[in-house]
Image (cartoon, helix red, strand yellow):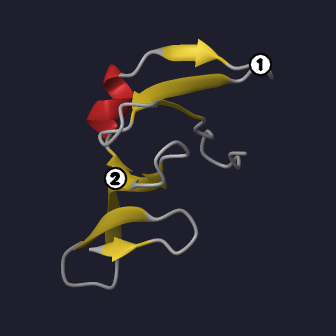
Amino acid sequence: MIVCDSCNAEMEVTRNGGGEDFELELMGVLTTCPNCGEEFEVTEEMVAAAPVATGADGVEVSIVPCPHCQARIELEFAADGESAV
């Protein structure tokens, strides 16, 4: 298991055969709740179950609950090759 320094994503490393090739499987992304300040993991299941809304700037966001204080947090995900704000 490795953790990205930039986005705190947890990834599992799997080697492919006997070579030097490997695969990374995204396990979850850590984020901090702006309401209570607690860090929590955003899983694929949370995102899949989250309602999608259009933010004030016209960007689609997923709304996930903080498991600590139940605040509703808007998360914007970038498509591959793009960077999120």
Q: Would residue 14 appear left or right of 3 to someone viewing this image?
A: left
Q: State the separation of the CA atoms marked 2 and 1.
A: 27 Å
Give the amino acid at mark 1. Ala
Q: Would residue 45 appear left or right of 80 to someone viewing this image?
A: left
Q: Would residue 1 appear left or right of 32 to someone viewing this image?
A: left
Residue at far right of view: 57
First in sequence, mark 2 or 1: give its number: 2
Give the amino acid at mark 2. Gly
Mark seen at residue 56: 1
What residue is at 59 percent from the left and 25 percent from the top? 61
Mark seen at residue 28: 2
Q: Residues within 10 Å of mark 2 (few under 14, many from 20)?
A: some
- In this picture, is 1 found above or below 69? below
What residue is at 73 percent from the left and 45 percent from the top? 85
- Residue 36 point in image, percent of width and height: 46, 47
- Along the viewing direction, whichever of 49 and 19 lies nearer the viewer: 49
Q: Would residue 84 appear left or right of 32 to someone viewing this image?
A: right
Task: Please tell me whether mark 2 or mark 1 is closer to you in this view.
Answer: 1
- Along the viewing direction, whichever of 70 and 76 lies nearer the viewer: 70
In the picture, which quadrant includes the N terminus? bottom left
| Residue 64: quarter of image | top left
| Callout 2 secondary element | strand
- Residue 77 point in image, percent of width and height: 58, 38
- Along the viewing direction, whichever of 84 and 69 lies nearer the viewer: 69
What residue is at 19 percent from the left and 76 percent from the top? 17
Residue at far left of view: 17
| Residue 27: quarter of image | bottom left
